[in-house]
Image (cartoon, helix red, strand yellow):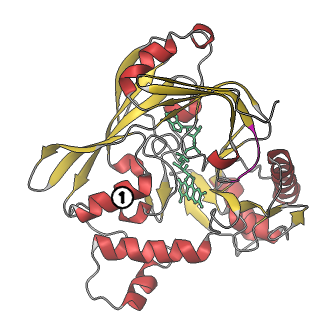
Amino acid sequence: MNSRVTGIASEPGYTVIENAPLAGRNTFRVPARADMLIDVHASEALPTVAAYGSLKHSPPLVLGGGSNILFTRDWPGAMLSVSTTGIRIIENHSDEALIRFEAGENWNDAVHWSLAQGFSGLENLVLIPGTVGAAPIQNIGAYGVEIREFVHAVEAFEWRTGEFVRLNNTDCRFDYRDSIFKRDPSRYIVTALELRLPRRRALHIDYAGIRDELATLNAGEPTPVLVAEAVARLRTRKLPNPALIGNAGSFFKNPVVDAQTADALRLANPALPVWNASDDRRKLSAAWLIDACGLKGVREGDAGVSAQHALVLVNHGNATGAQIWAIAQRVIETVETRFGVRLEPEPLVI
Ligand SMILES: Cc1cc2nc3c(=O)[nH]c(=O)nc-3n(C[C@H](O)[C@H](O)[C@H](O)COP(=O)(O)OP(=O)(O)OC[C@H]3O[C@@H](n4cnc5c(N)ncnc54)[C@H](O)[C@@H]3O)c2cc1C
């Protein structure tokens, strides 16, 4: 592909960039280009965009902050990003509120806004990169909390019908790092998220070091703001910073297997962390499996497994997406050969 942007057109509510570079729009910072990138800054423009020639029958790929996506090649079609902003309290009660966040808002800013307004619930989800619109796609989760606990409704534009729709929590079919949006990726463009946030709720602090981190803050009784501070400190220490080294956070999901398989693996590997996923399903630590295969810190050229965290694949400088994907394949195959468990990537791989 030509390495130059070949045209930019601004229309009311949206901008079209032809031959758009994507290296600055993905946190792996790998090079790639899209034939066309449509930046929608007013949701009302979506029906006009959808009626646009070649787009009528081939829905665009939606790009948020690019923090959960790996480009292994150029994108030979249209990409669309939603950059609408705004946060509005729709219903305000003494114990909770219903709040609407536009899809282009930065997720971490939305968390801080909610804490500053005195709401609780989102404190464990602080510092997850990306946009509000992407949060329901994989039901973002961290430190024992998932966004599905708070989702009242998701507003989306359905490409096929050209209509705006509202999906309630059940419609979204949330699961571990999964939802209807992830399973049927070309169907919906998320335009807004409505969350029901309590003013008080039990804090989730019995997870992965939060309590100890709170103790080092030495600030007395835990509050949502203090929990957010503790989680932010833990994340900053444990995860490589994409501003310094390209990555997309956890590259692999924790595999979920039946209880029998988990018991057998645990018998052979007593240190393997196992959690209950349901009555008869168990979640295994993917990081432990990768580490046990001696893959933490491996590197092929500029693509590698982080030496800081075995779940994170990194771009040490000039890796291509294809090189990062090759490392991912090596991890998947090595873990499968050794433990009989197949890891699945968490990000969208193009
Ligand atoms: C350092 C680091 C740490 C991370 N930690 C966590 C974590 O703790 N927990 C966690 O769950 N994730 C984590 N992630 C992954 C990522 O931050 C989240 O998945 C985030 O929600 C992705 O947001 P984004 O805007 O960057 O989406 P993108 O990466 O741009 O897109 C991700 C997916 O969502 C789709 N999408 C994006 N916006 C829309 C929209 N408006 N409508 C429809 N589809 C859309 C895309 O097509 C794609 O399939 C981490 C990533 C990094 C780099």
143 to 343, vertically: above or below: below
197 to 154, vertically: above or below: below
Write down the region rendered in magenta: 28-32
Q: Residues within 10 Å of mark 1 (few under 14, many from 20)?
A: many
Instruction: Tell me residue 263's x, y (percent).
Output: 68, 62
Viewer-side residue, 338 vs 297: 297
Asked whether, in this view, residue 80 is left or right of residue 304, the answer is: left
Going by the numbered disc 1, the residue's amino acid type is Val
Instruction: Tell me residue 168's x, y (percent).
Output: 33, 32
Q: What residue did someone put label 1 on?
A: 111
Residue 44, quarter of picture: top left
Asked whether, in this view, residue 49 is left or right of residue 72, the answer is: left
Find out whether residue 29 is within the magenta segment: yes
The residue lying at 45 percent from left, 86 percent from top is 212
Say whether residue 346 is visible: no
Asked whether, in this view, residue 313 is left or right of residue 175, the answer is: right
Find out whether residue 328 is within the magenta segment: no
Tag 1, which secondary structure? helix
Instruction: Tell me residue 193's x, y (percent).
Output: 35, 39
User: How many numbered tags mark residues here?
Assistant: 1
Viewer-side residue, 108 vs 39: 39
